[in-house]
Image: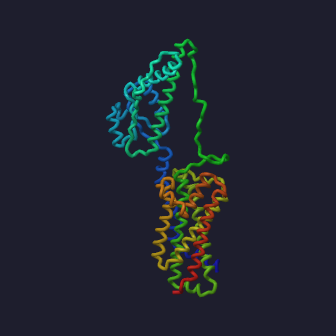
Amino acid sequence: MVLATIWKEFLLLVRDPGSLALILLMPLILVIVMTSIQSNAFRALQETEIDILLVDEDRDALSAVIESSLHDSPGINLVSKAEGRTLTRDQARQLVQQGKYQAVVIIPESATACLQKKTQSAADNIFSSYGSAAGSVEKKDDPPVKLEILFEPTIKADYRQTVAATLEKLIAGVQFEWFIGAMQEQLGKTGKQSEFTVDFSGMIQVDQAIASRKERPGTELNAVQHNVPAWSMFAMFFILFPLAGNFIKEREDGSMLRLRLISGSHTPVISGKFVFYLFVCLVQLALMICVGLYLMPLIGFGKLELGTNGVGIVLTGLAVAMAATGYGLLIAVYFKMPQQALSFGSISVVILAALGGVWVPVFAMPEIMQNISPYSPLNWGLEAFNDLFLRSAGTSMILPDLIKLTVFALAALTASILIHRSRNVG
């Protein structure tokens, strides 16, 4: 009876163009559309370039170093002139306030002279404390040299911190260089060897890379890597539409009643439906992986990177397919009216997808939603796929998510069989 049920479900599906389109075309369109929409958003997160105005009232050594360094800094597009003219601080402030630029750096007049004076005083203070030079002791209440950074109101806090940290690092480097020069000058006054340099550039090197296994380069999250597994799982959970539709239709036209009159038919009928639609879900996943591998590069997006654990991909796909099919069966068995089943099923899948990180990656959600997300079955599958595709994870790393998906699927399947057995004929 299991094989007969599988064959019957196959005939029902191939004779229903609407369900076939929902199963095969809907996920393909969703992946392409959502990848197109989100590609700029992911690029903005990873490759954001901030337009920064520079108002140089100093026009001396400090401003020259700052301008040169900011101009060469990745992620910063430095603009010293707008509309062909040099800007005043008031004009720059207005442009930033209007949102035309993200920030303005204002270097005040005589900043170089003031900083050199303070640096020289610091060197003099060191020598004067040892009686080597008279020194011009700096007054403690002398105001510091103030550089201003004015940000556009909607700019993110992390971008503000990046710009401020970059500027502070530049100034610290300039001040250190001038301090060494002042020390050399003081040593020259004492008659000691004054020619020395201190080079810290080669002492520490910071390399950035994606954490991954040594045998393959790291893969970062982008629109393709997120959307292909995410919307594949969304489509797999929408298997409840043909499943519930056919199940309730059989119950309404009397086919289910005739089957239930056969002794011991409950479990084989449910099992047959489960096996068939499990296979359909796996076909969906295979189709979407092919889209990521071959179609996405052709239309201008990156190629889906699958990682190195083929067995893990198969196991994850099987676990997600079981969870999606089990949930669809539970909806089909529990509800008596097709409108109820399809309405509840579609809304619940959309909610589970939103909570699971399908629509928006979990890291971009508010904290309260990030705490709720781990309770969605779609999150378990998405995390497993991310571990496999992005982190080249071994099977042991994804095992907790696979166990949760399998337990969810078996619980839904068991509940479906029990409800089907206990439902009164009518």
Residue 355, image x, y percentages: 49, 61
**Count of numbered circles on the image:** 0
Q: Is residue 89 above or below residue 304?
A: above
Depth check, front residue: 204 or 268: 204
Instruction: Judge left or right: residue 321 versus residue 74.
Output: right
Quadrant housing residue 385: bottom right
Q: Is residue 214 above or below residue 127?
A: below
Q: Is residue 330 above or below residue 103?
A: below
Depth check, front residue: 97 or 161: 161
Residue 422, image x, y percentages: 56, 83
Residue 105, image x, y percentages: 40, 34
- Picture residue at 49% right of the left edge, 47% below the top: 45
- Picture residue at 54% right of the left edge, 60% below the top: 374
Q: From the image, which quarter does the N terminus lie in?
A: bottom right
Instruction: Judge left or right: residue 73 versus residue 92.
Output: right
Instruction: Judge left or right: residue 332 versus residue 101.
Output: right
Residue 139, image x, y percentages: 42, 24
Quadrant housing residue 79: top left
- Picture residue at 50% right of the left edge, 38% below the top: 74
Quadrant housing residue 206: top right
